Amino acid sequence: MKNNLEIRQALEADASDIAELIYSTSVACCFTPEQPCPEWYRESVQTSQIANLLKSEQMVWLVAAQEQTLAGVLAVSDKSHVKYFFVHPAYQKLGIGKQLWHFALGRGALGNSLTVRSSLFAVPVYESLGFMAAEPPKTFNGMHYQTMVARYG
């Protein structure tokens, strides 16, 4: 991978790019024509919703940019819950997610105990970061997910 990856705190000006990254990656990786993206989820990741969340003092937002392209995003709530963790499909398997994760660890953005509602697609990624399934996979309003936990420290 090229060495021009920049990891930084997300800015309000990134809201549109973050919203597009989350939605397009979700559609590409987590949904099918038989099980399409639920409308409520699409609405929850609109630019205005992401812009509001970017203002939250309880959340840390980090982005990874490759040249001028947003390649990844990590949002953690209260140092204990991974809200969003996405790497654009064109940039997957290049170590960008791991770099985002380690940047967050180094910045103190992650607490000793973390939870996530992982898409079934991303379970192996979270397992590689030390997460374990906390319960069987579930479905909520058309979204399939796996609750996972990790303990650090």
Image (spheres, rainbow, N blue to C red):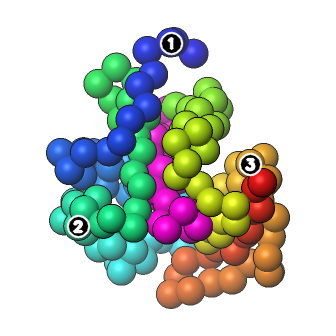
Residue 52 is tagged as 2
> Is 57 situated above or below 97?
below
Q: Which residues are magenta?
A: 71-90
Front residue of 103/73: it is: 103
What residue lies at 69% left-to-right and 83% top-to-bottom? 138
Residue 20: horizontal and vertical position, in percent?
31, 51
User: Disc 3 or 1, which lies upstream in sequence?
Assistant: 1
Amino acid carrying label 2: it is Asn
Which residue is denoted by mark 1 in the rendering? Answer: 3
Q: SS class of the residue under badge 1?
A: loop
Which corner quadrant holds the N terminus?
Answer: top right
Identify whether 105 is placed above or below 138. Answer: above
Q: Secondary structure at mark 2?
A: helix
The type of residue carrying mark 3 is Leu
Mark 3–mark 1 Cα distance, whole angstroms, equals 22 Å
Q: Residue lying furthest bottom in this view?
A: 141
> What is the number of the mark on residue 21?
none
